[in-house]
Image (tube, rainbow, N blue to C red):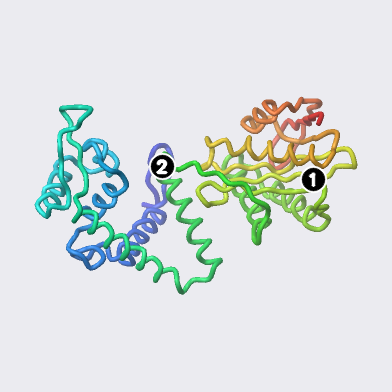
Amino acid sequence: MDSVHYHGNVVADTAVARVREFNRDWTEVLGLLDRGLLETDYTLAESRMIFELAQRESWERLALRERLGMDDSFMTRVLRRLEEERLVESSQSKSDGRALDLRLTDPGRKAFELLNRRSSDQVTELLAPLTNDQVDVLLESMTIVSRLTRPGRATGRVEMRGLGPGDLGWVVQRHGALYWDEYGWDREFEALVARIVADYAADEDPERENAWIAELDGARAGCVFCCRRDEETAQLRILLVEPWARGHGIGRSLVDRCVEFARHSEYSKMVLWTNDVLVSARRIYEAVGFELVEEERHHSFGHDLVGQYWELEL
């Protein structure tokens, strides 16, 4: 059997096997299967609880259990052990007499400091042999893994920056892969994006053209380009937001940044070309003030589409 069905999708056995292999490798790298974590007497579960308790003055027991995702009986056993070691103490909640508040004792705080220091030292040692680029790749990959598997845990920390090394290739690659996955657009579309990016890089006018990369929690999550159409007209091009990063207002922020730059650069008008199937992008354009001025049917990227021309008076 080569695949299994899961939530309507087909998951290849090779993908399942690779995720399991990664899990085994990572537990070995961090020594999570050792009797005590980080050469201490505390198990992984105990150490995780100590860490979470250290983030606040106190935790309501149910809230902590939900945060940790622990079974109630298992959490009871972990807490009992930490209370026996006098690392954690509990008391009746002041806001709810039926609930218990948990907090670290002074020895518990010292245990956290030891675990925290050794954990930092371990990760520092892990990263030390890597180049700066390798560290960037690792951190970005970790963010994407976390956002794909636990989308509700994103902090929503969005940052905008200019283009850096490797970003032009990333823009082309992500457009090609994403539009194939979501719309079935063939390599003709990726080639179009590659030409746009190549023309921008070859003839960029820094005074009147610019491009931005949006990052969510430190990982590249979107992009947009402001290009010169003519002396009076700017063109918004190749807007993209990664599926795992949607819902944080990134698309609107990118468009706003592009429009703001065009106004500052003293263009009188901004235009863009899109297709009617790109509903989410069209909603952003409408919200910003773009107006639809023309539509045309065309066959591109392996599909029959309706192209749209939008304009915004600046």
Please tell me which residue lies in front, 25 or 265.
Answer: 265
Question: Separation of disc 1 and disc 2 at Cα?
Answer: 35 Å
Q: Disc 2 designates what residue?
A: 153
* Quadrant in the rendering for residue 14: bottom left
- Identify the residue at image location x=79%, y=37%: 263
* Quadrant in the rendering for residue 264: top right
Please tell me which residue lies in front, 138 or 292.
Answer: 138
Q: Disc 1 designates what residue?
A: 227
Of the residues under marks 1 and 2, which one precedes in the sequence?
2
Instruction: Point out residue 157 in the picture as x, y percentages from the top left corner.
Output: 51, 44
Q: Are marks 1 and 2 in contact (CB under 8 Å)?
A: no
Please tell me which residue lies in front, 161 or 73.
Answer: 161
What residue type is disc 1 on?
Answer: Cys
Q: Quick one: SS at disc 2? A: helix
Residue 239 as seen in the image, left or right of residue 47: right
- Identify the residue at image location x=20%, y=41%: 102
Residue at the extreme front: 106
Residue 48 as seen in the image, left or right of residue 228: left
Residue 56 as seen in the image, left or right of residue 297: left
What residue type is disc 2 on?
Answer: Arg
- Identify the residue at image location x=11%, y=48%: 80
What is the count of numbered marks? 2
Q: Is residue 94 above or below residue 38?
A: above
Residue at the extreme right: 231
Instruction: Point out residue 295 in the picture as x, y percentages from the top left corner.
Output: 78, 27
